[in-house]
Amino acid sequence: MNRTLVIGDIHGAFRALQQIMERAEVTVNDQLVFLGDYVDGWSQSFEVIQYLINLEKKMNCIFIKGNHDLWCQLWLEKKFDNEAWLLKGGRATVTSYQHHSKMEKSNHLLFFQRMQDFYIDDNNRLFIHAGFSSLQGPVKEQYSSNYSLDRTLWEMALCMDKGIKKDNLLYPKRLKLFSEIFIGHTPTSKYGCFEPMNAINVWNLDTGAAFNGRLSILDVQSKQFWQSDTVQNLYPGETGRNRN
């Protein structure tokens, strides 16, 4: 049976991405949904993007845009050179692109520009980098920045009573809109966990690959998941993203 596999925040960790693709035994029959933040952190942001562009040619792939991807896109468009971004992993991205041609950069820019803000599948599962605030769902979101920056949806899910039912008046309307929601953006390592976390019907796939965690890929149906080695060990001598 064909699988839908969802992948958390990569942050330039190309070696980790290769590992999880091998460990999950991904085939051309699988659908892949990437939750964003492909760049900024480890030294191979260019290689990650090039790999994904090539992967798109032979597989069914959905690419969600994260906040770091938006910042990289703006930099490639020569509209963004922000010191705060550089300190949050952008410097490693700039370095990874420095010896590549204008044509290669242009091709990558086109890839960033066609990424999606979110994806809703035929089973009413939402895939989004961070979250949304509208009670009518992301389609009606007033502030598009919430797609890649919102943390309130995840924080709300974490605070929910596990035993509460959907018909309870206290059950948040946002969580009723979808059968399941898959996000990244907020590292599970922040909560002392280095595996995908589940809160009510929300699954968080950012398992801290930007820092001292691992990269994860999860089968949305079975909830089986596979992980890379600790990313720090794959990039000896590098520090990844700092936490500023």
Image (tube, helix red, strand yellow):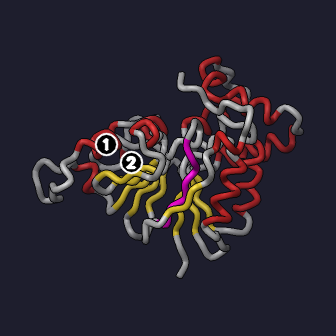
Provide the secondary structure element on which disc 1 rests: loop
User: How many numbered circles are shown?
Assistant: 2
Task: Look at label 2 and name its amino acid.
Answer: Pro
Q: Does the magenta portion include 74? A: no
Of 189 and 103, the residue lying toward us: 189
Q: Is residue 73 visible?
A: no
Pick out the residue farthest to the top.
83
Q: Decide: is 193 above or below 17.
A: above
Q: Dot 2, how many residues are within 10 Å of its Cα: few (below 14), some (14-19), or many (20+)?
A: many
Q: Tell me the tag on residue 134.
A: 1
Q: How far from the left and from the top, in percent, is residue 40?
A: 65, 35
Q: Are marks 1 and 2 in contact (CB under 8 Å)?
A: yes
Outermost bottom residue: 1
Out of 126 and 220, give the one closest to the viewer.
220
Kindly identify the residue that appears in the image at 55 percent across and 43 percent down: 213
On the image, numbered disc 2 is attached to which residue? 138
Category of crowding for the residue at label 1, using alpha-carbon neighbours closer than 10 angstroms: few (below 14), some (14–19), many (at least 20): some
Looking at the rendered structure, the kind of residue marked 1 is Ser
